[in-house]
Image: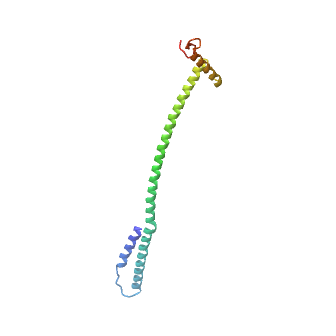
Amino acid sequence: AVAEESFAKALQRVSAHHMHCVPSTLGDALEGMRSDVINRAVQHGEFGQNLARDVVAPLADLRTKMSRKIKSIANAATSLQKDVKGAEDKYRRTHRQFERAMREAEEEINSATKAGLGLIPETAAKEVSEILDGVRTGGNGSAATSPFATP
């Protein structure tokens, strides 16, 4: 747009020079050429203005809007990355807790199995109930009958 307007101004400067000629065919040709240069200067000037108004300005507006949109998307992406990292950290913590609980449960099952408790829930519940009854009543007169009691 700026180039078109500069070219139009240059054409206007060229057309401003008057060549004084004797009226003749050459003079008429020079005057026709001068009129053509003036006409082209007007056309290029209008084209430059239209280009600035219809192309450059909308593109500048679009660039501004897209710049804002890009910043918004970048902020959202950063926020999402933080959320994902937080979720991953929470998952890892929870997974570690789960694994720890699983190890403890396995250790408890192994301890119960070594102590003579069955792995079937009904049997284990019955055995625990019997052991607790023995501890409460004193079993053979003492709590030492419990398989959990230390000698």
The quarter of the displayed image where residue 1 is located: bottom left
Examine the rendered structure and indicate whether residue 40 appears above or below residue 126: below
Q: Nearer the viewer, residue 7 or 62?
A: 62
Residue 89 spot, x, y in % from top left? 49, 37
Examine the rendered structure and indicate whether residue 114 appears above or below residue 3: above
Residue 143 spot, x, y in % from top left? 55, 14
What residue is at 56 percent from the left and 23 percent from the top?
A: 108
Q: Nearer the viewer, residue 122 or 107?
A: 122
Examine the rendered structure and indicate whether residue 98 appears above or below residue 138: below
What residue is at 38 percent from the left and 75 percent from the top?
A: 11
Examine the rendered structure and indicate whether residue 101 appears above or below residue 141: below
The quarter of the displayed image where residue 131 is located: top right
The quarter of the displayed image where residue 49 is located: bottom left
Residue 30 spot, x, y in % from top left? 40, 82
What residue is at 54 percent from the left and 29 percent from the top?
A: 101
Residue 33 spot, x, y in % from top left? 41, 80
Q: Nearer the viewer, residue 16 or 151?
A: 151
Residue 8 falls left or right of residue 112: left
